[in-house]
Image (spheres, rainbow, N blue to C red):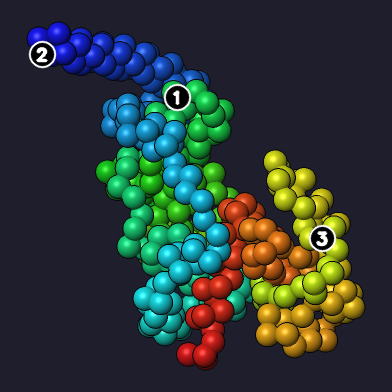
Amino acid sequence: MIKKLAVVLCGVCLSSSVMAKTQAEFQQYLTNLKQKAIAKGYDTQLIEQAFATASYKEKVISADKNQPEVKETLETYLPKRVPQWKIDRARKLYKENQEVLEKVAKDFGVQARFIVAIWGLESNFGAIQGGHNVISSLVTLAFDGRREALYKRQLWAALDILKSGHITLDKFKGSWAGAMGQTQFMPTSFNAYAVDYNNDGRKDIWTTKEDAFASIANYLKQEGWNDNLTWGRQVQLPADFDKQHILKRGTKTRKQWLEYWDKSERSLADWQALGVRRVDGSDLPTVAVDAALVMPDDINGRMYLAYDNYKVFMHWNRSYYFATSVGYLSDRIAYPKI
């Protein structure tokens, strides 16, 4: 028993020693970052204030290294990600915010149902935004070193947000990875797409719904959204279907994924000729629209003919499950008509 206790105590001492060393290294890293930030031209007072709140967050590293790897299929994922209560709430909030949503939709050329769907899936309609200090999260992830360049870019972008006065330091909160607000934008996305829709001088994606809606719409529009199209539709394939027509999986970059998209894409008339039908077995629409055939799981799972707007979802988050869940929720918001 004494020997076991000694081993435990030794482990605690070792852990404390490692943590003390990590904290010391982090403080040196922080000092170097402050010097680089000042060299980049950031105001010294801003840097001192922002970095005074920064601390090493072991939970952030733990969350980054231990993201869940549960095997999902769309059959298990969609009911959890888009349960009936979320559909009901999305439709209710659409109606409550219909006037501003339809104004944003008109101004940006993005159907309102897609704005609400992303709002609901990213932050549960603004209810879940994360309570982590953004600067601490980004400095911790940069310090970790595995993706240092990425998180340094996000850190400089976060400082730009503070410098511009869009949010105060005490309210600068987000997810453990640095995603922020009702839109869950990373800082670089905020700087590229966030909108001050109510013209109060701040791009407030944290507490101002109008800004959040417009920022989502602006992102989609800038990345190629076409409001004359929907996102896609679930389909069924004939028994002898040539799998070579399915969009190839296993891509490492967006560029490669787009190349595979181009190889799969063809007109709905061509898909009809290949035996592809709506999920209920009826003919495809007779409209001049091109689509790629997307397989989120495997040949036995759900299949979708995806239109160009689906590519925009995949720019937001290159995940078939994310893109399909946005499309699915948007359809449930629109039908039956509110």
- Label 3 sits on residue: 243
- Label 1 sits on residue: 144
Q: Is tag 3's residue or tag 2's residue first in the polypeptide sequence?
A: 2
Mark sitting on residue 1: 2
For numbered disc 3, what is the local secondary structure?
helix
Quadrant of the rendering where the N terminus is positioned: top left
**Res 176 → quadrant:** top left
Tell me the amino acid under the disc marked 1.
Asp
Foreground: 294 or 338? 294
Marks 3 and 2, how far apart at CA: 63 Å
Tell me the amino acid under the disc marked 3.
Lys
Identified at 77% across, 73% down, the residue is 237
Q: Is residue 127 left or right of residue 6?
A: right
Count of marks overlaid on the render: 3
Q: Mark 3 touching mark 1, by CB under 8 A?
A: no
For numbered disc 2, what is the local secondary structure?
loop
The crowd level at tag 3 (other Cα within 10 Å; few <14, some 14-19, many 20+) is few
Foreground: 215 or 303? 303
Q: Position of residue 291 (x, y in %)?
A: 79, 69
Point out the residue furthest to the bottom here. Answer: 337
Q: Position of residue 122 (x, y in %)?
A: 45, 59
Identified at 47% across, 49% down, the residue is 70
Identified at 54% across, 44% down, the residue is 188
Foreground: 185 or 301? 301
Q: Is residue 109 left or right of residue 247?
A: left
Q: Is residue 174 left or right of residue 10?
A: right
Q: Position of residue 298 (x, y in %)?
A: 67, 58
Q: Is tag 3's residue or tag 1's residue first in the polypeptide sequence?
A: 1
Q: Mark 2 touching mark 1, by CB under 8 A?
A: no
Q: Nearer the viewer, mark 2 or mark 1?
A: 2
Q: Nearer the viewer, mark 3 or mark 1?
A: 3
Q: Position of residue 62 (x, y in %)?
A: 37, 33
